[in-house]
Image (cartoon, grey):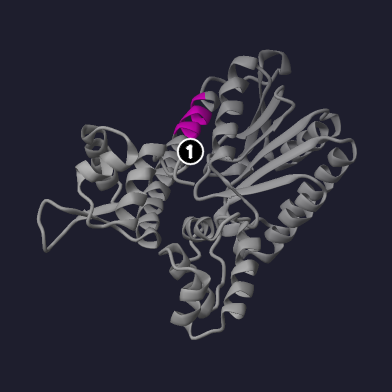
Amino acid sequence: MFTVLGLETKDEAVYREMLESPALGVEEIAARLATSPDRVRACLDKLFELQLIQESFEAPGRFLAVEPAVGIQQLLARQRDELIERQRQMADSHASFIRMLAGTGSASSRGSGVERLEGMDAVQQRLRELARDAAREVLTFMPGGPQSAAALQAARHNDEHALARGVAIRTIGLDGVRDDAATLDYARWLTEQRGEFRTAASLPPRMVLVDGASALIPIDPDNTRKGALCLSDPALLAPLLALFEQTWERSAPLGTEHRHTLTDRERALLTYIAQGHTDESAAKQLHLSPRTTRRMMASLMDQLGARSRFEAGLKAARLGWL
């Protein structure tokens, strides 16, 4: 978990020492970890930059570890903001790329590598052809939030035939579709049919990429009803494929990265566990029996896919549960 958040093994070790023994100085931490004081100071600089440690108000020049539940939330919030900004930059670059292609001329021959399809009827016809001929995979950006009933029906019809032939389908929608019943039903149907659906905070303009050999992108990203460009030139498809894979890696599968509804007791329990409490000490804080606390914790760990209580606290913070 710490590695995913940008910390190296030594950084984590220094952080844990400061949590467990707040009175230790640099020299003592270095001795415990069998490393040099300069290496510990470098770790402290990094931890301070990440807001996992802070300067003591009572003793200026001395640093204290921030509780994991607080520090991890701050770090994740910053990483989330950076991720959203990177996604926005990618979306802007992709939109500029589309506008550049749309303005290069009125190519209409498939042999040119760029075919112009005017109007939605022509686009839907080509989508049906691509779905029919797909042999390996179909990759889709689905921006615009909740989708219309007609669009979802067409997507399900095309996907159903492709999936029946063993074609892999991966689709990325906006985070907002998680709150739209119709679009969410489609996403769940797709995953039940062994397709994959993820969401992101922001997306490039709409795109369908088939077998790495053909792609449909809108002529005008701000008005998709004008039609689309059908690309088949490998030089144009390569950056689109790379963009999809980068966006996919930074997107969240259904069931994750979405705020989970916790009871007050569950939230308090996870907070205590993230702070280092045992089940027994957390039970005392919550005025519950240790047996009840262990049962609650086992259920939460199962939901989080965590192998330890400490990992459960970190994952809960990362997923925005706390």
Against 266, residue 214 (above or below) is above
Where is residue 293, by image quadrant?
A: bottom right
Residue at 44% of width from left, 42% of height from top? Answer: 88
Q: Nearer the viewer, residue 322 or 231?
A: 322
In-front residue for pair 4/16 = 16
Compared across the picture, whether 19 is left or right of 200 comes to left
Q: Residue furthest bottom?
A: 287
The answer to which quarter of the image holds residue 219 is: top right
**From what the image shows, is residue 215 above or below residue 285?**
above
Q: Residue at x 74, y 53 (%)?
A: 152
Residue 8 seen in the current view: no
Magenta region: 93-100
Q: Amino acid at mark 1?
A: Ala
Residue 110 percent coordinates (x, y): 72, 18
Judging by the rendered image, the residue that carries numbered circle 1 is: 91
Q: Is disc 1 placed on a helix, strand or loop?
A: helix
Residue 286 visible in the picture: yes
Q: Residues within 10 Å of mark 1 (few under 14, many from 20)?
A: some
**Camera-side residue of 247 and 147:** 247
Q: Is residue 311 left or right of residue 45?
A: right
Please count the marks in the image: 1
Residue 142 drawn at (x, y percent): 63, 46
- Residue at image location 46% in from the left, 75% down from the top: 281
Q: At which x and y percent is residue 83?
A: 43, 44
Instruction: Tell whether position 94 is magenta.
Output: yes
* Residue at 62% in and 78% down: 291
Does the magenta portion include 227? no
**Residue 60 image-quadrant placement:** bottom left
Magenta stretch, main secondary structure, is: helix
Residue 278 on image: x %, y %: 48, 68
